[in-house]
Image: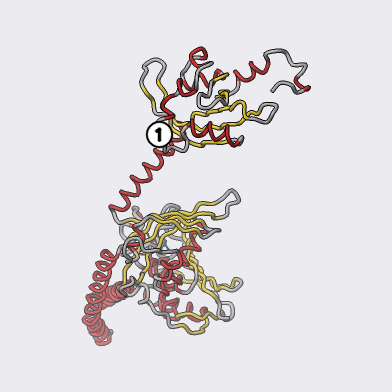
Amino acid sequence: MMNDSATDNLPEGLFQLLFEKSPGSLLIKADAPRFTIVAASDDYLDVTSVKREEILGKGFFEVFPDTDTDPKDEAAARKVFTRVQQTGEKLDVPVYRFDRVHPVTREKEEHYWSCSNIPVEDSEGRVAYILNTVVDISGEVRAKEAAIESENRFLMAAEATGLAIWDLSIPQRVFNFSPQMVAIFGHPPDTEVTLASVRSQVNPDDMQNVVLRSYNEALVTGQYAYEARITWPDDSIHWIRVKGVVLFDEKKKPCRMLGTIVDITESKRDEIRKNDFIAMASHELKTPLTSLKAYIQLLEGKLTAAKDPFIRTSLIKAASQVNKMTALIHGFLDISKIEPGKLQLKKQVFDINKLIGEAIAESRIMSGTHVLQFKPVGDINVNADREKIGQVISNLISNAIKYSPKGSVVEVKCEAHGTDAEVSVIDAGIGIGKKDQPKIFQRFYRVENDAMKHVAGFGIGLYLSSEIIQRHKGKIWVTSAERKGSTFHFSIPLAP
Ligand code: ADP
């Protein structure tokens, strides 16, 4: 071993010293079946809690007998050493268990090791020694076991609550999920499902309008959430709620998405029943309200000449309350129609400037309290549902009036930007705080503060507006500063 000329000048005993200082090393003579221990490094003695004088010159299995007990164990030391001796090839055992006896308490401690067995040949090419190096990996093994246990516990809790966990690596399209997924999509346990197969069960409209939209949004915002309809193999319709987060790589590119999926059919059915009830009740309320309005108009006509100003102002107030109530009932009716698939767009090409002009004229009649400004520039044609876009514009104007002081200016602007028409409604009102801005488009959300106390509303106008705009593949957003005013913008594609 030491007849290399390069080693000639090295001080005597240096190799012995180097060996003894090397991490976890044991030199064993290849004298099967005894495998006599020839040298051990300090670190080896330390990790195995034995003393050098106790082991040098002893057979390996006299010192570490337990390793030889399980004949089926491929990692059993005797098998490994014998193989190295016979084949002359290096053999690694990445993980094996060998319990250590604590040097003080003498109690057995569970330990895991990773070892490597390198043959050392004599001048005739026979394996004369085996260099056995070991590393204590008990910490890593325990951490891995704890991680697996915690994952199992989490999965059990998730399964018990009907939640499936999924994980999608974006570039590779590798889709992993917990077993509950199969049940949520209506299949018997152990059925093979894939990303493509579960996607094919999603209602095609929801796929276009909800799933793909949320997916593309998630790649930007990092948050993934939607509710959609799926069809089970028995043709029944179910609702799922998917939530997840996107992980980005160091180049800020989305690389992975993980989240949960749950069946919400029951609560969705309740919601649909509630919506149907609202639709029915609102519909029934509309009829008496229409005749009330007609009678008030008749009376107004008859009493314009009436001397008593009280009668006249009372009638004007009654008419305005009837109008408010009609608008509310229409809102409820709309909300009940917003279910996916129910809100149908009737598209046509029209000049949006003209539509804004009409909405402004109507608002001037309904409330003369504010200065409404609008300077249209040319024709701006869009291909959209005229009535619904009109509803959005009226909503934004009436909010601007509602949430700004009497006499202040409300300005509407419309410009073509690239391939979009962008409408802005600007007010000098109470404004909206930063934390409320993302929430005001949610259903029934209303800002809670003193300025809002005396303003009636249900928090459905902006929700409806945003649904209508999104169905047009457009965008709606707000820029605002508290006590300074708000600007609501929306954009929809121009007519091609
Ligand atoms: P509603 O006005 O019936 O409450 P909306 O959905 O139209 O419902 O509006 C939701 C909330 O957004 C309102 O309650 C209000 O807090 C806020 N908001 C909407 N428009 C404005 C505006 N122009 N200025 C200030 N706050 C507004």
Q: Is 297 or 143 nearer to us in this picture? A: 143
Q: Would you call the spot at circle 1 few (<14 residues within 10 Å), some (14-19), or many (20 or more)?
A: few
- Tell me the quadrant of the picture where the N terminus can be found: top right
In the rendered structure, the answer to whether residue 414 lies left or right of residue 326 reads right
Residue at the spot x=51%, y=79% of the render? 352
- Tell me the quadrant of the picture where the C terminus can be found: bottom right
Residue 398's quadrant in the figure?
bottom left
Residue 419's quadrant in the figure?
bottom right
- In the rendered image, is residue 15 in sight? yes
Residue at the spot x=74%, y=16% of the render? 10
- In the rendered image, is residue 309 in sight? no
Residue 466's quadrant in the figure?
bottom left
In the rendered structure, the answer to whether residue 346 lies left or right of residue 443 reads right
Label 1 element class: loop
Identify the residue under disc 1.
Answer: 70
Where's residue 481, x and y in %? 47, 55
Q: Is 12 or 153 nearer to us in this picture? A: 12
| In the image, the residue with mark 1 has its CB under 8 Å from the nearest atom of ligand 1 | no
The amino acid beneath tag 1 is: Asp
Where's residue 71, x and y in %? 42, 35
Q: Is 71 or 404 nearer to us in this picture? A: 71
Where's residue 465, x and y in %? 41, 70
Q: Name the quarter showing ligand 1.
A: bottom left
Where's residue 90, x and y in %? 60, 35
